[in-house]
Image (cartoon, rainbow, N blue to C red):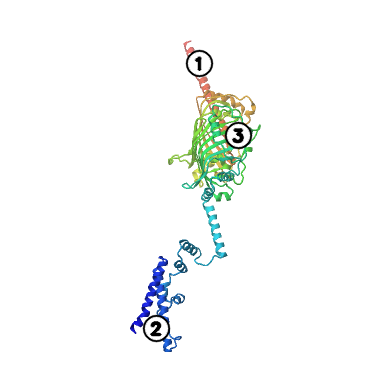
Amino acid sequence: MQRLKTLPNLLLKYKVYTGIAHQRAVSPFVPSYAGLYYVQARSSTLRHARWNSHHVREGGDHENKKTPRETNTALPNQSLHKGGEQGKSHFKFITERDRLLVQTTGILQKLKINLKWTLTRSMKPFNSDDISAFISWVLVSNVILIILGTTTFASLIIYLMNTVLAQEYVATQVGNLLTKNSALSVVFESAIVPDWSSGKICFNKVFVSRRPKLTQSFTKGSQNEAAERAKLAISERLLVSREDFDDGNYAQFDLTMDQVEISLSFSKWINGRGILDEVTINGLRGVVDRTHVFWKEDDDPKNYLNIHQPGDFEISRFEMNDVLFTLYQPNGFRPFQVSFFNCELPQLRKHWLFFDFMNANNISGTYDNSLFSIHKKYKVDDSPLNPSPWKKVTRMRVDNLSIDHLNAGVKGPFGWIREGQVDMVGDILLPDEDPDALQLSEMFSVIGQRLFKEAKRHSSIILPEQFQLPERNDIDPQRYFIMDFFLRLHNVTAEVPLFTNDLSYINSALIRPIVGYINSRRTYIPIRCRVVKDISDFEGSWTLYDSALMDDLSLEVYDAFAEYAADDNRKHLRLKRIGFWSLQVLIQLVLMSLGSIA
């Protein structure tokens, strides 16, 4: 009987061990608690069946009775659903994914189960809500990527599409996007490569052209054409006679660039300020042709100001390095070269192009072999005896510039000077956002003097005593542009103009004294003046002339020459008076001596 009683126990142990071995053979990743779950389940089931069979033989009411251990050991499923304390401690980490992983042997199937569990936390089939949520997640994530990382998103698109067959298509679409508001023809001769290290999009070997006969084409072009024109520009007086050198009353150019790096901004594009955020240009060569530019008689330069349009670029940072091009001017002016060693601008806006170049962080280069530079002026702390109210100063400097660049078609003293060289230094004074009392006082004084001078210049009568300058409350310092200008003329020769139309805004009686003063002091003539302009005059201006800055400089230089000539006349008159008085005293002494002798 003892052997018969132990036989079921042996069979139970055999089945338990074989079950654990089978489960681990199927999947070695089955956790140890899975075997425990199997052992407890099998032992509880057999024990429950054996106890019931024993009570059936004895005729007991087994339906209303409980097993001896039922209060402590319940079935696994019952413990999970009822939430027993002991069941929770053993089976609370078992999930539906674990059961499916136990039954699965393939790696791909296990990967699919884990992926689906990660996405939905359930093994049910995907429904419409899950699919719509997944699509919404993809769309929203891409929109966030476009807004926060526009350059990265565009780089990914270009990288994926920039295959051998799609290079020309990518170049066409990118070129159309970048030149949307311009009449430029752009050719990308090599692949467009995203620069992942700098976070920019890099274009190699770019050819940019603007000619009347050219349309916005993006076919493969030749960089050698622009390079040959730049090489022969100095030796050849005339441009190559070709169809694409047709008439056009604007600056035309053919430029080649070794490398162009750009970054994009979605927020700027959506606000109508262009899609370009930062631009860097390296290795620019070519020709800028202005031989076809002409002006009507008595034409106003302000007629050629740029008209702002939505989409005009507003670049946050602009850089140029290693730039060299040949410039052709109208009216048969000799061709000359312009170069930029480096150029760094904090911003470059199409509608404020000339003003942004004057406020550059750093520009250095040559203009017809004359060195020029624009940079922020670093100042040591002002002395307490002579404090300076200006904190932000930008210095412009040009050394040994030929005077023919200033007198071509210009009225006033610069137009009278026929030959010579000039050194120019200009300090651009910009007010702070929150100017102090000293700066405000200086600005009000400068602006008031400028307004008084303008009123006196344009008035043919003496101003009445009750004439008053505008009140300080009516003057906004942020609206004015102030530049201290210093010129040094070397070896200059001046001539009196032959036609009276050059004498429209000055007193013709002072022309000959000024010309005589220039020719008598031709070796070295220093001139210092101050120009005050409204900043709105630079809105839409691209050159020195359409901003009327050249006219203002001519007026100030004329006033300086007039003061010098008047002072020179006063000196001559003083010398004459002193000489006449000396001669009178000498004659009196002679007469007195003769009277004493007689």
Cα distance between the residues tagged 3 and 2: 120 Å
The reply to whether residue 447 is visible in this rendering is no
Residue 355 image point, x, y percent: 55, 40
Q: Which of pointers 3 and 2 indicates the residue nearer the eye?
A: 2
Between disc 3 and disc 2, whose residue precedes? 2
Q: Which of pointers 1 and 3 indicates the residue nearer the eye?
A: 3
Q: Amino acid at mark 1?
A: Ile
Residue 11 image point, x, y percent: 38, 77
Judging by the rendered image, the residue that carries numbered circle 2 is 68
Q: Residue furthest bottom?
A: 59
Q: What residue is shown at x 36% (from left), y 77% (from top)?
A: 10
Q: Which of pointers 1 and 2 indicates the residue nearer the eye?
A: 2
Based on the displayed image, in which of its 4 quarters is residue 246 positioned?
A: top right
Front residue of 493/210: it is: 210
Q: What residue is shown at x 50% (from left), y 19% (from top)?
A: 582
Decide: marks 1, 3 in contact (CB < 8 A)?
no
Q: Amino acid at mark 2?
A: Pro
Q: Quadrant of the N terminus?
A: bottom left
The reply to whether residue 371 is visible in this rendering is yes
Judging by the rendered image, the residue that carries numbered circle 3 is 457
Compared with residue 364, is residue 515 higher up or lower down, i.e. above or below? above
Front residue of 291/566: it is: 291
Cα distance between the residues tagged 1 and 2: 157 Å
Judging by the rendered image, the residue that carries numbered circle 1 is 587
